[in-house]
Amino acid sequence: MKLFVLLIFSFFITNNIHAQDTKTILFFGDSITAGYGLEQSEAFPAHIQSKIDELGLEYKVINGGLSGETSAGGLRRINWVLQRPIDVMILELGGNDGLRGIDLSDTRKNLQGIIDKAQAKYPSIQIIIAGMQVPPNLGIEYTKDFSNLYVELAQQNELPLIPFILEQVGGKEDLNLPDGIHPNAEGHKLVAETVWEYLYPVLKK
């Protein structure tokens, strides 16, 4: 009986130590992160988890994507998401703002608010900004300013920037769903490769 109790105690101690050693990566975004039109196992955050597991890294991925989410919506729900400890956050929001022609000063303010809240809650958090681009139907100036918004946010906050998260799949019919906006299963594998290029150096630190 004593041996049984000792084994149970050892099991819980080992698992608690493991849980404490495991860090958390939050992918906080919209339908791109959520894997719109696909199983969550096909979305790029799941592929990132597979890469992490293959390397034996102690990180757990959380998919915090919500289809249709705007930067304002993200700012409203960030406090709830941050209730559990987060070590790394990939911020992928703003695309829906651009598609709706929302004032870029509002988008900038909202994204900065998310960054500020995350850093206030967890001062040592590592944040990576995922840049997005929008079609030129709202005008060349708006399109250019929208892309620059992410560059400026990254520079002002001294954060790594993924210039365009859809770099390998944007505009490629065979890598997107019929809507031409959201990556298909094969597209998400390439999105994961793009993200991993910027995420892995952070995880190695």
Image (cartoon, rainbow, N blue to C red):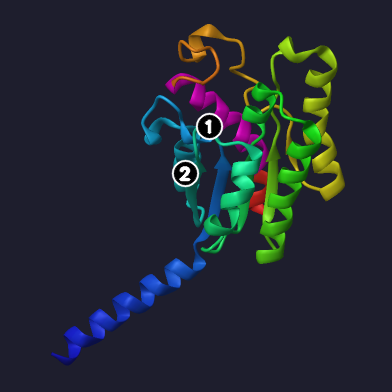
Left or right of 17 on screen, residue 4: left
Identify the main secondary structure in magenta: helix
Left or right of 192 on screen, residue 119: right
* Residue 186, percent from left and from top: 46, 20
Left or right of 11 on screen, residue 38: right
Of 125 and 182, which appears nearest the observer? 182
The residue positioned 40% from the left and 24% from the top of the image is 37
The residue positioned 37% from the left and 74% from the top of the image is 14
Q: Does 45 lie within the magenta span? A: no
The stretch in magenta equals 185-199
Count neighbours of disc 2 (C-alpha within 10 A) and say few if under 14, some if 14 to 19, many if 20 or more: some
Disc ID at residue 49: 2
The answer to whether 73 is drawn above or below residue 169 in the figure is: below
Would residue 8 be seen by someone viewing this image from the given angle? yes
Disc ID at residue 10: none
The answer to whether 37 is drawn above or below residue 127 in the figure is: above
Quadrant into which the N terminus falls: bottom left
Q: Does 195 lie within the magenta span? A: yes
Count neighbours of disc 1 (C-alpha within 10 A) and say few if under 14, some if 14 to 19, many if 20 or more: some
* Residue 33, percent from left and from top: 52, 35
* Residue 50, percent from left and from top: 44, 41
Quadrant into which the C terminus falls: bottom right
Q: Amino acid at mark 2?
A: Gln
User: Tag 1's secondary structure?
Assistant: loop
Q: Quadrant of residue 192?
A: top right
Of 88 and 58, which appears nearest the observer? 88
Would residue 122 be seen by someone viewing this image from the given angle? no
The residue positioned 81% from the left and 41% from the top of the image is 153
The answer to whether 153 is drawn above or below residue 137 in the figure is: below
Q: Earlier in the sequence, mark 1 or mark 2?
A: 2
